[in-house]
Image (tube, rainbow, N blue to C red):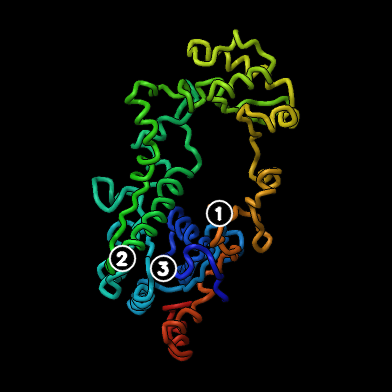
Amino acid sequence: MTLRQGGPLAGLKVIELSAQGPVPFAATMLADMGADVIRVDRVTGTGPRRDNPATDVFGRSRRSIALDLKDPRAAGIVLDLAEGADALLEGFRPGVVERLGVGPGECMARNPALVYGRMTGWGQEGPYAAMAGHDINYLAPTGALHAIGARGGPPVPPLNLLADYGGGGMFLAFGIVCAVLEARASGRGQVIDAAMADGVAMLTGLFYSLAQQGRWSTERGTNLLDSGAHFYGVYETADGEYISVGAIEPRFYARLVEALGLDPAEAPQHDRTRWESLRKRFAEVFATRTRAEWCETLEGTDVCFAPVLSLTEAPSHPHLAARGTFVDVDGVRQPAPAPRFGRTAAPVPDRAPVPGEHTAEILAELGLDEAAIARLRADGVTA
């Protein structure tokens, strides 16, 4: 496999111990920016990653070596990889990598400048540290999940965007870049304890600020940004589709009221006693036209408007299409790397590898000859 060239992280070498959710997302962020990411996959397994790897969007743009980490020889290969790497990412429960012989102590003994990124839901310590969980669980105790939902209804999980990817993978990737920069100056690596619950708590900072200013109620669906305000929300159109408005600033709100044909005197923006009745009035007006008709009326104006599109519709939206926000890789439509750099543009993504696709290539780079590679494969240490 020819390594892609360019990107702001060109020259960065990262080892990714195969995991789900935030770890592959963080590795993709690094790989998208030009890092050489080697994923350590399991020797056996089933599923789309093996049957149709091109559809594994957060597996793109890296190489794969398949190892049975329960075999000490496989652990030795991981240590060899870590010796020449800038960073290693893992997402096991606390204590697992130590039992496998590839924990921070072993890896950093071989490479004192290594940045060892550990991704968990609860963190490496604390009463919940050893407990299993998923995105929704990490949102729950932080206050984030409680704040999301309609008035009078239950909390609504925001897909798995907040904990897995926002509070998890993005913070892990940010931590890796920060620690690598420091290591290049000091010559010393360090362990990153990235917890999804910590990241989500950080993301909720605005709402803790507003609550302590007396500007945010714990009653869902009654606040400025949680569908309480009639000028910030989603409305159904005549064809059963939806549009969004977010006219927070007074000048934008005034234009929205005008576009809806309403009397400004009868639609005071910040009279909270009128928010519920005005939401019903807005809903009545938006229901008189189709989504396409509202696009024709409101696009290009400063009313803070956009249509609500499905995953199949979004890539064809004129603005996203013009910017190339989505790309096709091996016939699979997917988001393009982000953000964009003016001088060191991110390379075009490659499809995700089949687990073990580059095993022989990577082992050869470590100095093993064909006979040694064949023995490891015959013994089931690699695939």
Q: Residues within 10 Å of mark 2 (few under 14, many from 20)?
A: few
Q: Residue at x 52, y 25 (%)?
A: 227
Q: Relative to 367, does residue 257 appear above or below in the rendering?
A: above
Secondary structure of the residue carrying tag 2 is: helix
Q: Which residue is mark 1?
A: 340
Q: Are marks 3 and 1 in contact (CB under 8 Å)?
A: no
Say what amino acid the circle numbered 2 marks: Ala
**Front one among 34 and 301:** 301
Say what amino acid the circle numbered 1 marks: Arg
Q: Residue at x 25, y 73 (%)?
A: 109
Residue 140 horizontal side relative to residue 383, left or right: left
Alpha carbons under labels 2 and 1: distance apart:
26 Å
Corner quadrant of residue 81? bottom left
Q: Which residue is mark 2?
A: 185
Q: Relative to 284, does residue 206 appear above or below in the rendering?
A: below
Residue 299 horizontal side relative to residue 196, left or right: right
Q: Relative to 222, does residue 54 appear above or below in the rendering?
A: below
Query: Residue 95 at x, y = what percent?
Result: 27, 60
Q: Which residue is mark 3?
A: 15
Ranked by sequence position, the earlier of labels 2 and 3 is 3
Secondary structure of the residue carrying tag 3 is: strand
Q: Residue at x 51, y 71 (%)?
A: 63
The N terminus sits in image quarter: bottom right
